Image (cartoon, rainbow, N blue to C red):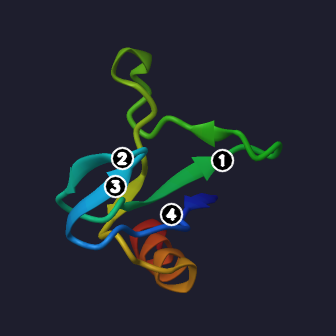
């Protein structure tokens, strides 16, 4: 299993990037992917035309422990 937890969660509102104000609507979500024995993520829906699809997409700010728990609940 591969879990991506963003290390930076912008506050809601706007942030400055290189002197330009950019709207920050919501924190980046936490994604959970199945992975092979080499740690390479596996596309959950198997369709390469729509990009890499996560097994689970959780709310921004969801930590590693909670993501593991949700994945275990899903996979049983």
Label 2: which secondary element:
loop
- Alpha carbon separation for disc pair 1 and 3: 35 Å
- Alpha carbon separation for disc pair 1 and 2: 39 Å
* CA neighbours of label 1 inside 10 A, class few (<14), some (14 to 19), many (20+): some
Label 3: which secondary element:
strand
Q: Nearer the viewer, mark 1 or mark 3?
A: 3
Query: Seen in the image, is 19 located left or right of residue 43?
Result: left
Q: Nearer the viewer, mark 3 or mark 4?
A: 3
**Residue 45, image x, y percentages:** 38, 34
Label 1: which secondary element:
strand
Query: Seen in the image, is 36 located left or right of residue 20?
Result: right
Task: Give the mark, 4 or 1, whose residue is nearer the N terminus.
Answer: 4
Q: Which residue is mark 1?
A: 35
Determine whether label 3 and label 4 are within 8 Å by CB.
Answer: no
- Alpha carbon separation for disc pair 3 and 4: 18 Å
Task: Give the mark, 3 or 4, whose residue is nearer the N terminus.
Answer: 4
Determine whether label 1 and label 2 are within 8 Å by CB.
Answer: no
Determine whether label 2 and label 3 are within 8 Å by CB.
Answer: yes
* CA neighbours of label 4 inside 10 A, class few (<14), some (14 to 19), many (20+): some
Task: Give the mark, 1 or 2, whose residue is nearer the N terminus.
Answer: 2
**Residue 72, image x, y percentages:** 50, 75
Q: Which residue is mark 3?
A: 16
**How many numbered discs?**
4
- Alpha carbon separation for disc pair 2 and 3: 6 Å
Q: Which residue is mark 2?
A: 19
Classify 49 as above or below 34: above
* CA neighbours of label 2 inside 10 A, class few (<14), some (14 to 19), many (20+): few
Q: Quadrant of residue 61?
A: bottom left
Label 4: which secondary element:
loop
Q: Which residue is mark 4?
A: 6
Q: Nearer the viewer, mark 2 or mark 3?
A: 2
């Amino acid at each position: 299993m591969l879990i991506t937890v963003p290390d930076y969660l912008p506050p809601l509102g706007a942030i400055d990037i290189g002197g330009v104000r950019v709207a920050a609507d919501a924190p980046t979500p936490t994604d959970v992917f199945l992975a092979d024995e080499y740690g390479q993520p596996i596309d959950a829906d198997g369709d390469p035309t729509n990009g890499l699809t996560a097994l689970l997409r959780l709310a921004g700010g969801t930590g590693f422990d909670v993501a593991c728990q949700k994945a275990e609940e899903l996979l049983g």
